[in-house]
Image (tube, grey):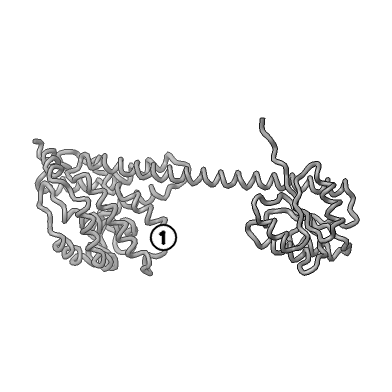
Amino acid sequence: MYEVKQKTILVVDDTPANVSVLTGLLKDQYKTKVATNGAKALRLAAAEPRPDLILLDIMMPQMDGYAVCEQLKQNAQTRAIPVIFLTAKTEIEDEIRGLALGAVDYITKPISPPIVLARVATQLELKTARDFLREQNVLLEHKVQIRTRELSVLQDVVMVAMGSLAESRDPETGNHIRRTQQYVKILAQALCEHPRFSAYLSPENIEMLCKSAPLHDIGKVGVPDHILLKPGKLTADEFEQMKKHTNYGRDAIVAAESSLETETSFLTCAREIAYSHQEKWDGSGYPEGLSGDDIPISARLMAVADVYDALISRRVYKPPFPHEKAVEILRDGRGTHFDPDMIEAFLDVAPTFYAVAQTYADSQQAVEAKAGIATGE
């Protein structure tokens, strides 16, 4: 059977007769603690187990009840304990002062025992309700945090799974999405304090960029195999078909967004990247020929990451470039292919890009397996 915990009341009064009357009145229903001065009252209030309510005299030597109440309300450990003033001070200004300091009630002496018991019971009921609500809020916040973490993990899994789906048909290997995801994060963090990018590159948006990056080539699932897997150079017509992967990727993500009741930031970011990561700073890219700042920041970041990885990776149609050569090619693309400020930041963090490339390097087996798929062997 559930046992209700008996409430504890701290009686603070420097007059023994008053203490005796109050403890005698309360003893049948409550536990009591007694303090005969302000300093002891503060110690007992902060000690575990803390009292559920404090009956506080005002007129005490050295530290009066007003000072005690003020210190109780300034202390995080004791501010939630309700305080009822019991005092012979009957002026309305005294009552106003006590309530302004945080007391919940003000009872004048000589006391009426039924009134004291009724008001004590009322304040204890209110405190129980407040404590319950506070505990429920803490529990709810904890549940929200757990749910948020679960959703974040789910987003990560969905993004990587969808990205892997695209790569299952692509001559590129599986670690490509892991590398480009890390490149985007490194470059975004390098630019987060840059005047042109700081407003966009908040920690939350950088997290969204990382989640979204694996979907940059999701549209390749719509490209015919004979084009996507062709080991040699594409014809002009074939290249036009290949370019449509940006539209396919955007359309797939738009379809996913339309099934949601509210806009989802990570899908919005994924849509920008999938559709615009082949745009170039000078307007010579596709699908829309956007230039400069008209290209979304997310897509400009992805362009640097994607091109770097393509250069340093082995493909069925080319050997890998050395890191130094890849850096040189990106440097030469500053202001034509790439945002100039992004290339400046890339040059600073290029060694970190290379470290990521080494960490997530493709195995020879994986490269050969992909090559076999691409050539139909």
Give 290 or 128, whichever is nearer the viewer. Answer: 128
Identify the residue at the far front of this view: 16
Tell me: residue 176, above or below residue 168: below
Q: Which residue is identified by label 1?
A: 202
What residue is rendered at 19% in x and 45% in y?
173
- The amino acid at mark 1 is Ser
Give the x, y percent position of residue 129. Answer: 69, 44
Task: Characterize the local packing of mark 1: few (<14), some (14-19) or many (20 or more) Cα atoms within 10 angstroms.
Answer: some
What residue is rendered at 16% in x and 52% in y?
313
Give 212 or 74, whichever is nearer the viewer. Answer: 74
What residue is rendered at 26% in x and 53% in y?
180
Q: Can residue 104 be seen in this view?
A: no
Please indicate whether residue 193 sits to the left or right of residue 169 in the image: right
Location of residue 87 (image quadrant): bottom right
Name the quadrant of the C terminus.
Answer: top left
Give the x, y percent position of residue 194. Answer: 36, 68
Please indicate whether residue 314 sits to the left or right of residue 155 in the image: left
Tell me: residue 261, above or below residue 39: above
